[in-house]
Image: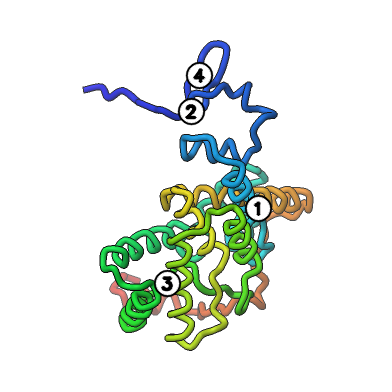
Amino acid sequence: MHQEWATSVTRVDADEVYLRGYPLGGLIGKMSFAAAAYLLIRGSIPTPDQTRVMDAILCSVLDYGLKKPGTVAARYCVSANPSMTAGLATAVLSVGAYTLAPDEAGDFILRTMAAVKASGDPFDKAAEQLIARMIETKQRVPGFGHPTFRFVDPRAQTLKRMAQEAGIWGEACDWYEAIHRAFTAKANKPEFVINEVGMMAAILVEMGFAPHEMTGIAIISSLPGVIAHISEELASGIRIRTLPDSAVDTQVHTADLDLELAAAGWAA
């Protein structure tokens, strides 16, 4: 049986495109990109405060140089296939559990906060119990730690300040910080920061975004930097980047083919 498609996101008429019911021609010039992105994803027009925080989140990644695997992968890709599209796709496909994606942290915050609210325990007590269980079972807390930043991630703290100023900081953020306090104390790792991805997840939970939507927003935030790196790579004229021999521990040894074939049962 034929299944009809259904969407409440966009309608395209002969003379206009309607996003969530609003004419795109009317939105252009009246609404910032951050506000329009919020409208499309959440389905409602954001307040000015929500827009400022959304704009801050979209500016919170932008680029991390050649320390971001997706950017390196994109530059390798376009050195062989000089295409902006191919480079962008490569960078996006590199987003996941260990880089850029806030969905795991968002799901963790939502799931654990629901449990602690059901228990009625104070946040600090519940966080200590949670961290004790996670350390015992060797589970990782998503959104904690950074390869460069110690004690403070400046990007995360700026997002926190802006969310507080906008009145968006709430229970999800407080709960996540309680978990962080418990973790740094129990693991004796005061240098472990809440990174920008973790802070982004906590704030986006407060704003009502689903975890999978959070990763899409983080990817959008990263794309200007990826575009800049791909453009730089294309302009360099370097073709087919490879690793220098000094960077590779080659463990391939010379073998006697005839001897190995005989040992495997092949006729001479």
> Looking at the image, can residue 255 be seen?
yes
Asked whether the residues under the numbered discs 1 and 4 touch, taking CB atoms below 8 Å apart as contact, a structural biologist would say no
Q: Residue furthest left?
A: 1
Q: Is residue 49 above or below residue 256?
A: above
Element marked by disc 4: strand
The amino acid marked with disc number 3 is Val
Mark 2 and 1 residues: CB-CB less than 8 Å, in contact?
no
Task: Residue at 54%, 11% (x, y): give it.
Answer: 14
Query: What residue sits 58% from the left and 62% below the top?
Result: 160
Q: Closer to the camera: disc 3 or disc 2?
A: 2
Q: Which label sits on residue 20? A: 2
Query: Dot 4, how many residues are within 10 Å of its Cα: few (below 14), some (14-19), or many (20+)?
Result: few
Residue 58 x %, y %: 61, 50
Disc 3/disc 2 C-alpha distance (Å) = 36 Å
Residue linked to disc 1:
59
Q: Residue at x 37, y 59 (%)?
A: 110
Q: Secondary structure at mark 2?
A: loop
Q: Position of residue 71 (x, y in %)?
A: 63, 57
Q: Which residue is mark 3?
A: 141
Where disc 1 sits, the SS reads loop
The secondary structure type at the circle numbered 3 is loop
Circle 1 packing at 10 Å, graded few (<14), some (14-19), many (20+), is some
Label 4: which residue?
12
Q: Amino acid at mark 1?
A: Cys
Task: Establish if 245 lies above or below 190.
Answer: above
Q: Residue at x 77, y 51 (%)?
A: 237
Residue 262 seen in render: no
User: Could you tell me how far apart the alpha carbons at marks 3 and 1 are, in whole angstroms?
Assistant: 24 Å
Instruction: Judge the density around disc 2: few (<14), some (14-19), many (≥20) Cα neighbours within 10 Å.
Output: some
